[in-house]
Image (cartoon, coloured by chain):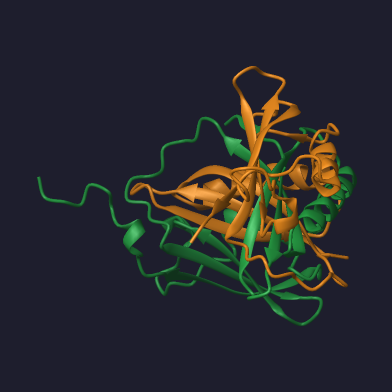
Amino acid sequence: MPLVNRPAVVTFTLVDASGSRSQSTANLIGGILLTDARTAAQTLATAVEAASDCTVESYAITFPTVETQPAAPALNSRVEKKGRIQFRTSAGKVYTFTVPGIVNSVILASGQIDEDQALITGMTLALLASPWSDSNGATLDQVIGAYERFDSTSKGQLPSNRRAD
Amino acid sequence: MAHAPAALVIIAYRDASDSIGYTRLWLATGSVDAARAAVATRIGVMGALSGCAVTGYSITWSTHLSDTPAPGPQLVSTAGIFIWQTAVADAYAVTYIPGINAAMLDATDPAGLAINTQKLEVINYIAVLRDGAFVNPFEYDITALENAFVQFEP
């Protein structure tokens, strides 16, 4: 399962006088530290804004990693079949962790996810520890629910070979 | 500026019908290495929970800028395109400036199509892209500007 880090990408979001938004991207050198990436991004944002009529309202620095030899997905696996585990955060809010194509072995007959199943307890214990959080940086304190849910299939998710022979 | 309090981790999966699904998680850390280590120790378990195949993941730190100037008249659909030479022959990089200021355009015939590389703002932009931190998607160093012009998008 070789995971390969790719060069970081900084994406600037610009807004014009009509309220329309557009993005501009640039790639950052490999191995760059987050602090250096932020410095480079801020410098480039200033230069872009000076040459543009638009305003740079935000930027995002993404560090991608790709699996160069992904395993074959299980027969009949479907991303629309979701496992959802809900957590109460230290701020009193709810964070939901979703697993696409959840395996049947962790699902009870009622559709509830078996929270005592070894795979589930391993995952929840990990997420209840640092550095995992919600989007506001609040810690995840308690599991409050876990269940199976099916999302509707979009046109793009229909099988590519669905036409009759 | 305001840095988001947590980094967004997106794990991508592919199922038997070739559809792509995602898991979104948040990490309260300012270290790329710590974030990658946290994901690496969990990705095996996440893969075991799913019948889909994990195809990769990304970690994103966002920053929101405040006290920014009001935008000028040029719309985002008028973009400056910059084509760059890299350290590898015949390999290029491309960057864009949406809503490029009309004053950055060359007035020589044909007027309003080429970008004036003698404008101070353009010189500064070129200098930033060439300062060593930026590369093309294949990690080749950006070395020099090849061409720069305007493109109109509907």
- Where is residue A141 drawn, in percent x and y? 77, 71
**One can see residue A118 in this view:** no
In screen coordinates, is B143 left or right of B137?
right
- Where is residue A16 drawn, in percent x and y? 68, 69
Q: Which tint is chain A?
A: green
Residue at image position (35%, 58%) is: A156
Residue at image position (61%, 43%) is: B109
- Where is residue B23 drawn, in percent x and y? 58, 58
In screen coordinates, is A110 left or right of A31?
left
Residue at image position (88%, 72%) is: B67
Residue B76, picture quadrant: bottom right
In screen coordinates, is B3 left or right of B36?
right
Q: Residue furthest top?
A: B89
Q: Is residue A37 above or below residue A120?
A: above
Residue at image position (85%, 43%) is: B124
Q: Nearer the viewer, residue B54 or B150?
A: B150
Q: Residue furthest front?
A: B109
- Where is residue B123 drawn, in percent x and y? 83, 41
Q: Nearer the viewer, residue A82 or B29?
A: B29
In screen coordinates, is A128 left or right of B46?
right
Residue B4, picture quadrant: bottom right
Q: Nearer the viewer, residue A74 or A5?
A: A5
Q: Which chain is orange?
A: B
Q: Residue furthest bottom?
A: A92
How many marks on residues? 0
